[in-house]
Image (cartoon, grey):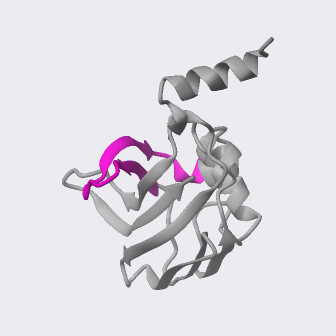
Amino acid sequence: MFSITSKLLITIVSLGLTNIILSTKLEFRSGNCNFKHDVFSNFTIKFANSNANIDMIIVSILPYGLKVHLSFGMRMSKEKAYQIVFQHNIKNFCSLIKGTQKSLYSRWFADMLKHGNFATSCPIQRGYYYLHNWGLDTSLVPSFLYMGDYQLGLRLYYGKYKKNDYAPILECIMQTLLV
């Protein structure tokens, strides 16, 4: 007699849906960031052993009103382009870093704080900030993201996203593999 777990696994395999099995690891592969030099004197992102390492020096105070745009693109095998599967604007970055916002992003940020010294209040002060040897805990990966090749976009900005007053201060693109 099969258990419910065995029946589910047999159904997944027989339907060819093996890519929906939960991933075991998120591997950071490569990435690149562009930043405003009057805000950051340095913003370096490197990847080693599938983990992310970021070093930055903020040279001007970041006032209230900072926003974040996140995008998740997936590339099908043998395709060159990534197709956006999810994107979201975080309109109150300060509430996210203070921990007053309860969301997936606040859990990601809390996980990042275990490996870095990011600011946890606004305005964000000048100084050296880092994230060393961070790999996203796969229990924090949304269930709608299947195993595969992803491109993550991160933009820090003021104003309204992609409108006349849009003022980006940081734009990063990272390639990852969810296995």
Residue situated furthest front in the rendering = 1
Give the residue at x 42% y 42%: 88
Q: Using the image as rendered, state which of residue 154 and residue 4 is in the foreground.
A: 4
The percent coordinates of residue 16 (x first, y second) are 47, 30
Residue situated furthest top in the rendering = 1
Give the residue at x 62% y 45%: 23
**In the rendered view of the protein, which quadrant contains the N terminus?**
top right
One can see residue 68 in this view: no
The answer to whether 75 appears left or right of 147 in the picture is: left
Q: Which residues are magenta?
A: 66-95
Give the residue at x 36% y 78%: 36
The answer to whether 175 appears left or right of 96 in the picture is: left
The percent coordinates of residue 79 (x first, y second) are 26, 54
The percent coordinates of residue 66 (x first, y second) are 46, 57
- 107 to 59, vertically: above or below: above
- 101 to 168, vertically: above or below: above
Q: Is residue 92 magenta?
A: yes
The percent coordinates of residue 130 (x first, y second) are 64, 77
Q: Is residue 93 magenta?
A: yes
Picture quadrant where residue 103 is located: top right
